[in-house]
Image (spheres, grey):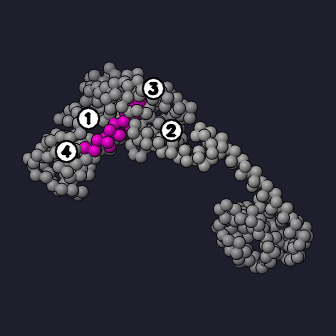
Amino acid sequence: MNEFQEYYYRHPYIKELDTVVLCCHACKDGYELVLKDTIFYPEGGGQPCDKGTIQGVEVIAVQREKERIVHITKQPFAPGENVHCEIDWEYRFDLMQNHTGEHIFSGVVKQLYGYSNVGFHMGEYICADFNGNLTEENIEEVERRVNQAIWANLCVQEILCSPSETAKYDYRSKISIEGTTRIISIDGYDMCACCGMHVKNTGEIGICKVINFEKSRNKTRVFLLSGRRAFAYLSHIHQENSSISKLLSAKPLEISTAVSHLQQRYVDVQKSYRTVAMEMMMKDVDQIPIQDAIIYTSVLADSEGMRAFCNRCIEMGISTVMVIAKTEVGYAYVIMSHTIDLLSIRAEFNAAIHAKGGGNHEMMQGSCTASPTEISIAFHAVTGISMHIVS
């Protein structure tokens, strides 16, 4: 049997079919059912199998096993029984749109940059792996050309070739194929060996949108969406954009500028606050009684201000000074001492409070999520020194 003569290949837009059960037997996941004809596409070629029902019973999976198509259901059927099949057309058409969109994208990448699609997966997004480094500008140009092909409403042609005929065509293929080769051709854009389901004309795809891309060594992975799924994604983006636009009192196409201004204002406010905080810290120094070791806490201070405070205290004759400041994710600390070798205790102290930081024999600094009380207890545990709280 030639697999490319299956009913779903000959009639890719048929949504329902009446047929006959040839055989049915129990299996691990329920029952394996073989039909005389089927409109259900089996998993293969990177494309998931169709969803739908047989006589109202959900089809769990569809697989090709050698010369037959096996449907997995939870209920048995009698051999010879007449059954009505119905596929989830919205799901099938979504796969057709996205699969054909990926073909055009991969074909254009090959034409422009010479890179081959070496990996393909259809999940939440369509992932296509290319064996070369594509820049953002490269991908934008490919996307532009892909959508030109879509809007040109070109014919998507199926070509079936015997082994002796394949040499006539310059087509993409990841594997060596024995027997009949099925080539999907989109004139001027792509020719690729494929067993998946595709639209008749590129205009049915509607739109192709690159969502993201990643680089790893000498490969580029591109995440795509086409058709209805791309429209839904862009609609969601538009809704989010509109909400942010209202919050910022900015036009939709001016949001990035508004965010940049907002970010700069935030930076300016933070800078002003730190300046005030440092001035207050320096005023507090003069009122601190001379102690061997002190802890000073600040609501918001940068590392520069914390070190300046510690230096002033050391100059006044305080042996060990710890400043703790609140950050957005926890606490930062700066410790100075001329009586303790801080380098020798740094690793043990940071481990005790799960901190990240560095320093030398006389100063160390870091950040953690431990509370000021936990930081103080940990320092006492590794040094034996009791710190006097001065703020």
Could you tell me which secondary element the residue under label 4 belongs to? strand
The magenta-colored residue range is 87-104
Query: Does the stretch in magenta take in 92?
Result: yes
Q: Which residue is mark 3?
A: 148
- The numbered mark at residue 85 is 4
Marks 3,4: beta carbons within 8 A: no
Q: Is residue 74 left or right of residue 46?
A: left
Marks 2,1: beta carbons within 8 A: no
Q: CA distance from mark 1 to mark 3?
A: 25 Å
- The numbered mark at residue 13 is 1
The quadrant holding residue 16 is top left
Q: Residue drawn at (86%, 69%), measured in percent from left and top?
A: 284
- The numbered mark at residue 220 is 2
The x and y percentages for residue 259 are 65, 45
What amino acid type should be assigned to the residue bearing mark 1? Tyr
Q: CA distance from mark 4 to mark 1?
A: 14 Å
Q: CA distance from mark 2 to mark 3?
A: 23 Å
The x and y percentages for residue 318 are 87, 73
Q: CA distance from mark 2 to mark 4?
A: 41 Å
Q: Is residue 378 visible?
A: no
The x and y percentages for residue 147 are 45, 29
Q: Residue drawn at (78%, 58%), measured in percent from left and top?
A: 273
Could you tell me which secondary element the residue under label 1 belongs to? loop
Q: CA distance from mark 3 to mark 4?
A: 37 Å
Category of crowding for the residue at label 1, using alpha-carbon neighbours closer than 10 angstroms: few (below 14), some (14–19), many (at least 20):
some
